[in-house]
């Protein structure tokens, strides 16, 4: 019974705030989330990366290992994604990002926080860092059909990852004022991005055609790939549980934002459909994954 109470304690806060956002979005369809997007992208997310990497006790070795495991995980996502897109006769490049880039930031980090406390934050952030880098490199490349180095240079989260790794490498303890500042920004960001996720779900136009299969691929096959990695690399403890939880996240909204800038409308609608359907599915699949993670990787 205790583990079920723990699952409720982990999942309810996240889904409740998403629900608040959905309610606000339905009540006011013109609700403007540009402020949240700009704040999260330019200030909140960089602060969250820095805080979770440098103040939670994670070592450079753990960060590096799970950074690499996340790369392997994405490689597995790519292989399965290409197979499913080929079978569904979809665009193999433009529609690949929502299958391989899960919502490890907006949803994954807070769920890992509630599941494993601050110790889970560092590993969750290491995995999220990989996804963020892929959004601004591979994601843009697949959407534009060419690599854009300008996008990487202008991305504050990329610099936050670099600075955080430098702090880990030289074992620099952040001054207290910086730790406290990034602490406040981290938790403000978690609340705002979860709420904006709920608002965004009210604005996407979506179709169930094909998106159900692609969404199942995202939320079910994702954890299976993570479990294969955990088994083959003999991973254990909370860090393995974090990897499993992060792999189960639905498609990230950032896939839609990148796609809307560079992809044709037909592709954008398909990406939006995968995001909405996979997010709804995750309301049922994530509790099961969290149960498994807490039971066997604690």
Image (spheres, grey):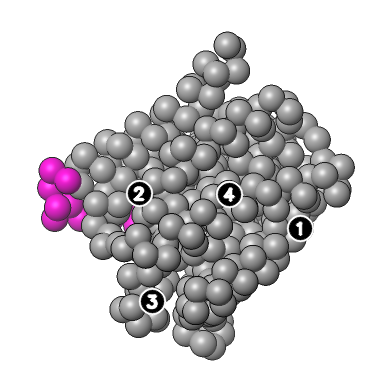
Residue 68's tag is 1
SS under mark 4: helix
Mark nearest the camera among 3 and 2 is: 3
Mark nearest the camera among 2 and 4 is: 4
Q: Compute the Cα span from label 2 to label 4.
A: 21 Å
Q: Compute the Cα span from label 1 to label 4.
A: 22 Å
Judge the density around disc 3: few (<14), some (14-19), many (≥20) Cα neighbours within 10 Å.
some
Q: Residue at x 29, y 53 (%)?
A: 200
Q: Residue at x 48, y 22 (%)?
A: 8
Q: Earlier in the sequence, mark 3 or mark 2?
A: 2
Q: Earlier in the sequence, mark 4 or mark 3?
A: 4
Residue bearing the label numbered 4 = 220
Mark nearest the camera among 1 and 4 is: 4
Judge the density around disc 4: few (<14), some (14-19), many (≥20) Cα neighbours within 10 Å.
many
Query: Which residue lies most toward the top here?
Result: 1
Q: Report the magenta residues as a range.
A: 26-38
SS under mark 1: helix
Give the percent coordinates (x, y) of residue 275: 41, 58
Q: Is residue 236 magenta?
A: no
Judge the density around disc 2: few (<14), some (14-19), many (≥20) Cα neighbours within 10 Å.
many
Q: Quadrant of the N terminus?
A: top right
């Amino acid at each position: 019974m205790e583990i079920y109470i723990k699952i409720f304690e982990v999942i309810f806060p996240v889904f409740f705030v998403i629900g608040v956002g959905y309610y606000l979005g339905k009540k006011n369809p013109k609700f403007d989330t540009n402020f949240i997007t700009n704040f999260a992208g330019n200030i909140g997310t960089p602060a969250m990366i820095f805080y979770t990497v440098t103040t939670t006790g994670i070592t450079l070795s753990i960060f590096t290992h799970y950074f690499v495991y996340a790369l392997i995980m994405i490689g597995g996502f790519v292989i399965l994604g290409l197979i499913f897109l080929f079978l569904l006769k979809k665009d193999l490049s433009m529609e690949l990002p929502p299958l391989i880039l899960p919502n490890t930031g907006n949803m994954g980090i807070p769920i890992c926080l509630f599941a494993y406390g601050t110790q889970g934050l560092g590993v969750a952030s290491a995995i999220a860092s990989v996804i963020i880098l892929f959004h601004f490199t591979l994601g843009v490349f697949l959407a534009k059909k060419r690599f854009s180095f300008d996008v990487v240079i202008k991305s504050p989260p990329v610099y936050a990852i670099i600075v955080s790794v430098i702090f880990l490498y030289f074992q620099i303890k952040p001054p207290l004022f910086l730790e406290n500042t990034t602490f406040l920004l981290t938790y403000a960001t978690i609340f705002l991005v979860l709420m904006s996720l709920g608002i965004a779900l009210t604005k996407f136009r979506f179709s169930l055609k094909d998106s159900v299969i692609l969404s199942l691929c995202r939320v079910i096959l994702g954890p299976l790939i993570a479990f294969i990695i955990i088994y083959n690399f003999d991973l254990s403890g909370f860090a393995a549980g974090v990897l499993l939880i992060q792999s189960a996240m639905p498609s990230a909204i950032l896939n839609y934002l990148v796609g809307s800038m560079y992809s044709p409308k037909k592709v954008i609608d398909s990406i939006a459909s995968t995001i909405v359907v996979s997010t709804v599915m995750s309301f049922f699949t994530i509790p099961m994954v969290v149960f498994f993670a807490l039971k066997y990787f604690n």
